[in-house]
Image (cartoon, grey):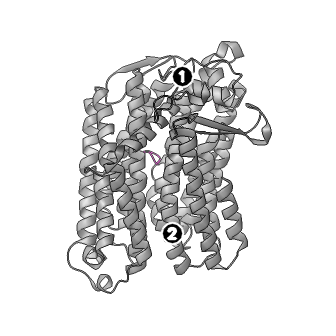
């Protein structure tokens, strides 16, 4: 957080000195990656790693002060941010700074990264709202970056929708504070698990959590809250859209997973609901069945709406924007399965599948949007009707785009194969053939729009703008590196699996989370079956040293 904060302020102070701004930004990107790697190793993956680390800002103890928490789940998400963030930053210094030398681009880039990082590390609900706003304020400017009528229109709707979402977010946070008397996530989990001891009525929590769920669905772009994505993604610079799709979109999914399984899973509130498409009536003493039913319906709609919408788009940005709606359905489906099941093993598998597929989506969709930026820089257009033969004009660019497209489809040995396999495995183990059918339909639609984009943009006859195009070698090198990362994740999947397994364990282990944040707190009953935690990535180190 300090690295990106200092980078934002430093690049802002440098004013109209583009080379100095670029140098500071690239150095900060490298430092950020080192810091994230240190968290990954020393907190999660090392043989003696504690599994979770906390920092009480200003040395004010929880639950009164601001708590920052790094565990397997937040570390996994930060790794995705570091990967796509550095790639987007390098391409930005080669593209945006050359095409439009606006001194606020790089500072806002780092403020966007700061908001995402803070959201993944915060330990209380109100500061989750604060970091959401930091992230959104930077993204508002990027959506309107080019200043044309269509960009202003997209920014207007994007700002209006997110201001409404922020108001709902605050309403939900205020209601939860009025109901429980706390906003610290660990303290909230403890109080909801034993409401009688704290003299609270947890019944309103289900409705208040529904407000938060709608906000997080907006951030994630789930149907029916997806309508901002096509216009915003087409309006923003592709280098920023890569970060929006690859990182900021995951903040909504992260918030759903964190609050559902770490915080609200232990709430003693009776819920009885029928899951759409499954036909099973789910009953329990926590809000999880409610979350699972609603999330499954939104995920199914996202798969179909996004896939069908992507097939008929006439530009690469349009295809990828609607594709993002469909792909988020593949991430939300196993999370919904994890919420609806009572099996600890299936719940763990659901979160694991969502995380692995989220990693694949970050790498593949980030690579695709960055490819669009490179194509626009070289040809001046991204309209499919105006392109063709790009694979012959720049074979490395064509190969990178093809690898990312195949990763979305789920072709082995790329990263997408394992993500999609785990998602289908979770649906099959849940005994939900209708969900498997929906996933299959989403996969077929992915094949359709990926094939169409490749054939129209990279195959066939080369028009004059493609024959005369000059492709930036540094940008292509970044794209090639991301394509190599997609292949490396698939070929060397075992350490990625162990990391994701540790992240899923952290998400489900409320007891270890509470114990790390507030060691003096009473133990929390663990409804997820995760037990006293252990670092799933290294053979069972006790979470938080419990």
Q: Position of residue 363 (x, y in %)?
A: 41, 55
Residue 488 against residue 497 in the figure, above or below = below
Q: Residue at x 35, y 68 (%)?
A: 315
The region drawn magenta spans 221-225
Question: Reading the chain from its start, which is encountered first: label 2 or label 1?
Answer: 2
Residue 88 against residue 131 in the figure, above or below = below
Q: Where is residue 478 in the image (x, y as percent from the top left)?
A: 43, 67
Q: Which residue is drawn at 37% across and 66% down?
A: 480
Residue 433 occupies which quadrant of the picture?
top left
Horizontal side of 316 relative to 110 (left or right) equals: left
The single residue placed furthest to the top in the displayed view is: 196
Q: Does 286 appear in magenta?
A: no
Tell me if I can see residue 274 in this picture: no
Q: Nearer the viewer, residue 324 or 525?
A: 525
Say which of marks 2 and 1 sits in front: 1
Q: Nearer the viewer, residue 491 or 314?
A: 491
Residue 195 against residue 327 in the figure, above or below = above
Q: Name the residue under label 1.
A: 532
Q: Mark 2 points at which residue?
A: 90
Residue 463 occupies which quadrant of the picture?
bottom left
Q: Position of residue 404 (x, y in %)?
A: 33, 59
């Amino acid at each position: 957080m300090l690295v990106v904060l200092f980078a934002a302020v430093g690049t802002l102070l440098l004013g109209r000195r583009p080379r100095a701004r670029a140098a500071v930004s690239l150095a900060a990107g490298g430092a950020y990656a080192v810091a994230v790697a240190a968290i990954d190793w020393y907190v999660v993956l090392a043989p003696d790693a504690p599994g979770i680390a906390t920092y009480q800002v200003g040395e004010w103890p929880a639950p009164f002060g601001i708590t920052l928490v790094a565990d397997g789940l937040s570390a996994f998400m930060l790794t995705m941010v570091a990967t796509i963030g550095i790639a987007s930053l390098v391409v930005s210094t080669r593209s945006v700074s050359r095409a439009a030398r606006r001194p606020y681009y790089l500072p806002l880039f780092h403020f966007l990264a700061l908001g995402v990082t803070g959201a993944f590390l915060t330990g209380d609900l109100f500061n989750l709202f604060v970091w959401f706003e930091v992230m959104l304020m930077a993204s508002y400017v990027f959506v309107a970056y080019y200043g044309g009528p269509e960009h202003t229109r997209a920014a207007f709707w994007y700002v209006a929708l997110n201001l409404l979402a922020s108001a709902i977010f605050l309403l939900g946070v205020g209601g939860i504070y009025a109901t429980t008397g706390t906003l610290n996530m660990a303290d909230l989990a403890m109080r909801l698990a034993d409401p009688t001891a704290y003299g609270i009525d947890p019944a309103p929590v289900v409705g208040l959590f529904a407000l938060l769920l709608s906000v997080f669905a907006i951030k994630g772009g789930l149907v029916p809250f997806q309508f901002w994505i096509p216009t915003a993604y087409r309006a923003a610079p592709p280098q920023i859209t890569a970060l929006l799709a690859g990182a900021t979109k995951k903040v909504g999914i992260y918030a759903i997973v964190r609050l559902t399984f770490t915080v609200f899973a232990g709430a003693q509130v009776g819920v009885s609901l029928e899951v759409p498409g499954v036909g099973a009536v789910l009953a329990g003493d926590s809000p999880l069945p409610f979350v699972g039913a609603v999330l499954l319906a939104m995920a199914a709609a996202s798969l179909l709406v996004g896939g069908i919408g992507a097939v008929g788009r006439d530009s690469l940005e349009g295809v990828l924007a609607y594709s993002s709606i469909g792909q988020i359905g593949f991430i939300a489906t196993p999370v919904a399965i994890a919420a609806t099941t009572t099996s600890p093993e299936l719940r763990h598998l659901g979160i694991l599948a969502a995380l692995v597929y989220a990693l694949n989506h970050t790498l593949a969709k980030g690579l695709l949007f960055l490819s669009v930026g490179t194509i626009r820089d070289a040809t001046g257009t991204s309209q499919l009707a105006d392109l063709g033969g790009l694979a012959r004009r720049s074979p490395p660019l064509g190969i990178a785009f093809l690898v990312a497209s195949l990763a979305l489809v789920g072709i082995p040995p790329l990263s997408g194969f394992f993500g999609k396999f785990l998602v289908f495995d979770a649906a099959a183990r849940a005994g939900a053939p209708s969900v498997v059918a929906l996933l299959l339909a989403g996969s077929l639609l992915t094949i359709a729009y990926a094939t169409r984009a490749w054939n129209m943009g990279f195959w066939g006859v080369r028009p004059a703008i493609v024959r005369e195009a000059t492709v930036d070698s540094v940008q292509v090198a970044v794209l090639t590196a991301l394509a190599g990362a997609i292949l490396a994740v698939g070929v060397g999947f075992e350490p990625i699996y162990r990391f994701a397994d540790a992240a899923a364990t952290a998400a489900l282990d409320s007891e270890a989370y509470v114990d790390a944040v507030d060691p003096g707190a009473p133990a929390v009953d663990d409804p997820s079956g995760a037990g006293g935690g252990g670092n799933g990535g290294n053979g069972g180190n006790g979470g938080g040293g419990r």
